[in-house]
Image (cartoon, coloured by chain):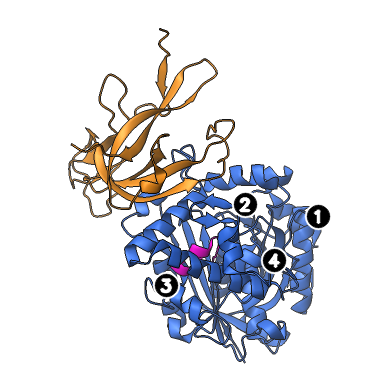
Amino acid sequence: MEVKKQTPCLEGWFTMPPQEPQLIGNRCQSCGHYFFPRVTSCRNPLCDKAKPLEEVLLSRKGKLFAYTINYYSPPPPYHAPDPFVPFGVASVVLPEGIKVGGQIPKGVDLNALKVGMEMETVREVLYEDEQGSEVLSWMFRPAKSK
Amino acid sequence: MKKVAVVGVGETNFSGPQDKTEVELFAEAAMEAITESNLKPEDIKALFIGNVLGDFSEGQGMVQAFAAENIGCHHVPANKYEGACASASMAIRDAFIWVASGFYDIVLAGGVERAATMGTGLATRTFAMFSDARYEYPSGITFPAVFAMLTHLYADTYGIPLEKLREQMAKVSIQSYRHGSVNPRAQFFGKNADMTVEKVLGSFMVSSPLTLHDCCPFSDGAAAVVLASEEVAKKLTGKPVYITGVGQSSSGPLCNQSDYLPRIRAREISSRRAYDMAGVTPQDIDLCELHDCFSIASLIAAESLGFFEFGKAGEAWEKGEADIGGRVAINPSGGLKSKGHPIGATGAGQVYEVTRQLRGEVEPERQVEGARTGLTDTLGGDGGTLVNIILQRGW
């Protein structure tokens, strides 16, 4: 079986196989604020920035904050399949207190989405590039029951 | 600080694709404003112009310099402002500050855009550049998706069933279509006056639950205003409209604003600054041209501007409280939804409308009788730039 090469859509934004899918953020060691995407300087206006930022893996699970189903094809650089298939996008609030946007993978029942439901971070193929590599992105799907 | 007046306004028709260049379009609006001010181009000391995508739409950069020369404002300082859809409002606010400071006594400000000429493909692509370029738009989170998510969030936050909210939003679009249908400058002049809730809900779904009729169009157009110090204004016109308050505020990417959503924090700060500066409250506002890029955006804006309680704006529209004759007349021009949204010119179009309303000069069907105080509200990107301007009758 041919194994396709996999590349992240954004280098260093999330873990790659064989690691569990997790977003990579950072945390200010002075004031404790978390950031995603990572920042190079703490954004808290009240922070003395005495200590550096540290890289952290963010919680895999969070709650659905807001969502929609896109019925039209977004423009490039979004890679839309041909023919276009409507897809879900979500904003998920993580226990670290930050919200992250991402797609909802194919196969999820979009009519069953409800604000506040538990979501988990997954990693899915966004599209295949010209070299035949699978370009991966983080996405959010309703969490499987424990 | 000097008092600053609007002494003349001008505007092209807001429209679909048309053949004039941005320099030519702006000239049409600018000369109307200069002529109305009883001035000549040589009297203008500086030009501040909003323009967002001129380089993409017609390959023309630095439009401000060519626009100045083209109307006979030779060798004046000409500045371009880019704050996505709030560009022209930024230009007018800065023009106000320069005149108020006494550095210039007469400044021409405005904006121009050919978003419709670009076509939906290029316009959608380039508009998306004003959300966070790192991951919002590569993920397919475009502006309709952002406002669609805000719709779900709004329904959830205020406990309004989504179907009920969708009907309220449809009524926002219906009101805007009705006013735009009798505004000869509007893109949908003479159109859509018979819009119904059923037609809005049944039209093409863009990003659920937003349909085509919940979204504003792409537009071409230009608008311009002449600002002058009080002493100059008194010599030029018997009907000076004073800018008595301005506010501007900014935010980072939408995901970083999320603690406050569906409210837009930058708008609350910006409008508060404008109210405080003018010494007025939301209760004093007779009419407001606000940023209804999507129907839900009208509800969010009207609440943040202090007209209605949070979660109650939809009811206000249903009861006619946001209409002419209601508590505050919102978008009597037809707003972005029906008048149109040439992004770099939109804020100047709002000042054009409010000024003519305060002078009592618009079509009788959409005139707010006895209006003394008006407010404009423009939002650039997904909350990145907010500008508010308060205008009051000076006679």
Q: Which residue is mark 1?
A: B20
Residue A31, image x, y percentages: 18, 47
- Do marks 1 and 4 share a subunit? yes
Q: Are marks 1 and 4 in contact (CB under 8 Å)?
A: no
Q: CA distance from mark 3 to mark 2?
A: 28 Å
User: Nearer the observer, disc 3 or disc 1?
Assistant: 3
The numbered mark at residue B223 is 4
Is residue B81 depicted above or below B189 in this figure? above
Q: Residues within 10 Å of mark 2 (few under 14, many from 20)?
A: many
**Mark 4 — on which chain does it sit?**
B
Q: Are marks 2 and 4 on the same chain?
A: yes
Q: Residue at x 79, y 75 (%)?
A: B35
Q: Position of residue B128 (x, y in %)?
A: 54, 45
3 and 1 marks in contact (CB < 8 Å): no
Whichever of callouts 2 and 4 sits on the residue coming sooner in the sequence is 2
- Disc 2: host chain: B
Residue A120 in sight in this render? yes
Determine if the magenta segment contains residue B295.
yes
Task: Tell which tag, 3 or 2, sits nearer the viewer.
Answer: 3
Q: Amino acid at mark 2?
A: Val
The chain drawn in blue is B
Q: In the image shown, does B371 or B320 lie closer to the viewer?
A: B320
Q: How far is the residue under mark 3 from the one under mark 1?
A: 38 Å
| Residue A104 falls in image quadrant | top left
Question: First in sequence: mark 3 or mark 1?
Answer: 1
Which residue sits at x=42%, y=8%? A2
Do the residues at discs 2 and 1 belong to one chain? yes
Closer to the camera in the image, A38 or B316? B316
Q: For label 4, count other residues whose C-alpha is less than 10 Å away and answer few (under 14), some (14-19) or many (20+).
A: many
- Provide the residue designation for mark 2: B52
Residue B303: numbered disc: 3
